[in-house]
Image (cartoon, rainbow, N blue to C red):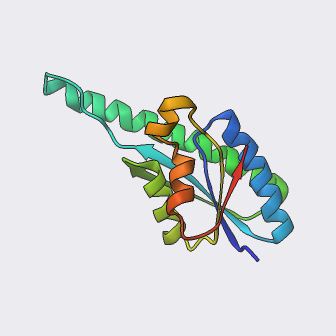
């Protein structure tokens, strides 16, 4: 049925649950996992141009560290379960767009992810990345709560 499952993570506890369940699903299906971490684009908020270089470099180091740490969880869990896994990190202003592009680029046929729903008026106005993936995806999306 499904051969390549895209598994985005943000390092949260909810993502950890999605990782465990997605890898179990991949094992049953004989599928591969493609782990994804979306690095946010660097945002500039300063009035002094000389501050930008150091801040940008610090941001890149921190983002790379987070990507390595969060993707290692997927890699370790997949290895323990005997599930093949590839790891991808991309930079994007809108995570949902990066997730959809990664699914297409890596020829994934299913996206599994945690629900990170926002509540109240904030959820109505902004929506969650999961909601945006659900609305715009051309392939099936499995959401873990």
**Viewed as shown, does residue 122 lie left or right of 5?**
left
**Viewed as shown, does residue 81 lie left or right of 86?**
right
- Where residue 4 sits, quadrant-wise, is bottom right
* Image x and y of residue 133, in percent: 53, 56
Seen in the picture, residue 41 relative to 35 is either above or below; the reply is: above
Seen in the picture, residue 139 relative to 57 is either above or below; the reply is: below
**Viewed as shown, does residue 98 lie left or right of 7?**
left
Q: Residue at position x 71%, y 74% from top?
A: 3
> How many labels were placed on the picture?
0
Please state which of residues 23 and 129 is positioned toward the viewer in this rendering. 129
Screen quadrant of the N terminus: bottom right
* Image x and y of residue 33, in percent: 68, 62
- Where residue 49 sits, quadrant-wise, is top left
Q: Residue furthest bottom?
A: 1
* Image x and y of residue 45, in percent: 24, 27
Q: Residue at position x 54%, y 70% from top?
A: 138
- Where residue 46 sits, quadrant-wise, is top left
Seen in the picture, residue 119 relative to 19 is either above or below; the reply is: above
Seen in the picture, residue 32 relative to 65 is either above or below; the reply is: below
* Image x and y of residue 85, in percent: 68, 61
Please state which of residues 38 and 58 is positioned toward the viewer in this rendering. 38
Screen quadrant of the C terminus: top right
């Amino acid at each position: 049925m499904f051969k390549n499952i895209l598994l985005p993570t943000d390092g949260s506890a909810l993502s950890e649950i999605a990782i465990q369940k997605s890898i179990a699903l991949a094992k049953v299906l004989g599928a591969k996992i493609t782990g994804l971490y979306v690095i946010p684009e660097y945002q500039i908020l300063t009035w002094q141009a000389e501050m930008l270089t150091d801040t940008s470099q610090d941001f890149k180091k921190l983002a790379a560290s987070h990507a390595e740490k969060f993707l290692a969880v997927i890699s370790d869990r997949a290895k323990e379960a005997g599930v093949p896994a590839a790891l991808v990190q991309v930079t994007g202003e809108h995570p949902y767009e990066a997730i959809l592009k990664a699914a297409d680029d890596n020829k994934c046929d299913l996206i599994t992810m945690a629900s990170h729903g926002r509540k109240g008026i904030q959820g109505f106005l902004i929506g969650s990345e999961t909601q945006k993936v659900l609305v715009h995806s051309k392939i099936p999306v499995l959401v873990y709560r």
